[in-house]
Image (cartoon, rainbow, N blue to C red):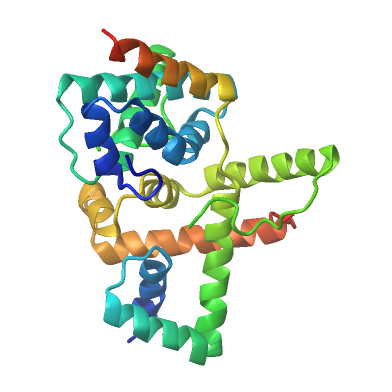
């Protein structure tokens, strides 16, 4: 079986044919976006890990039951499952979720590679947590489109349809999200390229 | 291109949603127009910051999920 060049759909097909490593490849490929999108909502790492596991168990069970029909849209489907589980969790806890209920480059490219000491690692972890907190401070509509585009890999057309706005409005919200995020990073003088 | 559509086109370009012709046109614009180039650079700083903030679940968490996938494979 070919390894890293397979598309998500090809890996799903391979898993359904009984190739166990295919599902592991899918998990490793998308784990950061899925996990971080949950973390942004729940802000608690242990809870995020529990929900992450629940999400992937549901994904695996759905794939094995033959009910998966999201051709070419694996990540958006998984993130949708994750967000629905977050909403269910908040309902049980009787708290409102951070997002409205909906249906549906390479990591660390900018980081220079060098020998990190423990202090640098801790500083980097803190900076990344601060950036996630800044994302949470964005206005609701900007955060929503940012999560859908950047973490769930939905196209702007899909986002526009789901949020019932024009594509230019969705693009404008994303533009403001990125501009506002940049301003907040500058205000806090965060050096995320550490 | 008016200003708003140019800015929105930069967003689409940043997220690889432009067709081949648009990609070439926008790439040239970024290279030749210092204001557009600076705007694009600003946008990409934020895109890269979001990528940099991505976090891994723990190894135990991943092992648990992969273990589940394996366990039901034999059922």
Front in this rendered view, residue A21 or A163: A21
Q: Residue at x 28, y 82 (%)?
A: B21
**Residue B72: horizontal and vertical position, in percent?**
31, 12
**Residue B27: horizontal and vertical position, in percent?**
43, 82
Position of A180 with respect to A159 (left or right) is right
| A42 in relation to A2, above or below | above
Q: Is residue A59 visible?
A: yes
Front in this rendered view, residue B23 or A94: B23
**Residue B58: horizontal and vertical position, in percent?**
58, 25
Front in this rendered view, residue B32 or A96: B32
Corner quadrant of residue B1:
bottom left
| B33 in relation to A125, above or below | below
Q: Is residue A103 visible?
A: no
All told, the count of numbered labels is 0
Check the image and name the residue furthest to the front: A1
Q: Work out which quarter of the rendered image holds the N terminus of chain A and state it.
A: top left
| A64 in relation to A144, above or below | above
**Residue A104: horizontal and vertical position, in percent?**
25, 38
Corner quadrant of residue A51:
top left
Position of A101 with respect to A142 (left or right) is left
Q: Work out which quarter of the rendered image holds the C terminus of chain A and state it.
A: bottom right
Corner quadrant of residue A20:
top left
Front in this rendered view, residue A27 or A173: A27
Check the image and name the residue furthest to the top: B75
Position of A88 with respect to A121 (left or right) is left
């Amino acid at each position: 079986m070919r390894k890293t060049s397979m598309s998500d759909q090809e890996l799903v097909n391979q898993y359904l044919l009984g190739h166990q490593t295919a599902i592991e490849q899918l998990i490793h490929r998308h784990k950061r976006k899925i996990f971080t999108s949950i973390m942004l909502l729940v802000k608690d790492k242990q809870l995020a890990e529990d929900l992450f596991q629940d999400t992937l168990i549901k994904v695996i069970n759905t794939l094995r039951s033959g009910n998966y029909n999201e051709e070419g849209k694996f990540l958006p489907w998984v993130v949708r499952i994750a967000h629905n589980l977050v909403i269910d969790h908040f309902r049980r806890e009787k708290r409102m979720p951070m997002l409205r209920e909906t249906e549906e480059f390479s990591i660390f490219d900018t980081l220079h590679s060098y020998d990190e000491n423990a202090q640098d690692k801790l500083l980097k972890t803190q900076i990344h947590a601060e950036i996630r907190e800044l994302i949470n401070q964005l206005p609701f509509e900007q955060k929503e489109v940012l999560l859908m585009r950047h973490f769930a890999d939905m196209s702007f057309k899909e986002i526009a349809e789901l949020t019932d706005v024009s594509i230019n409005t969705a693009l404008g919200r994303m533009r403001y999200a990125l501009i506002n995020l940049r301003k907040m990073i500058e205000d806090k003088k965060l050096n995320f390229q550490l | 291109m008016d200003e708003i559509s140019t800015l929105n086109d930069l967003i689409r370009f940043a997220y690889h949603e432009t067709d081949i012709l648009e990609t070439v046109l926008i790439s040239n614009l970024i290279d030749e127009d210092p204001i557009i180039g600076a705007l694009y650079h600003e946008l990409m700083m934020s895109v890269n910051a979001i990528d940099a903030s991505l976090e891994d679940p723990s190894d135990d968490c991943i092992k648990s999920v992969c273990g589940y996938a394996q366990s039901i494979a034999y059922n």
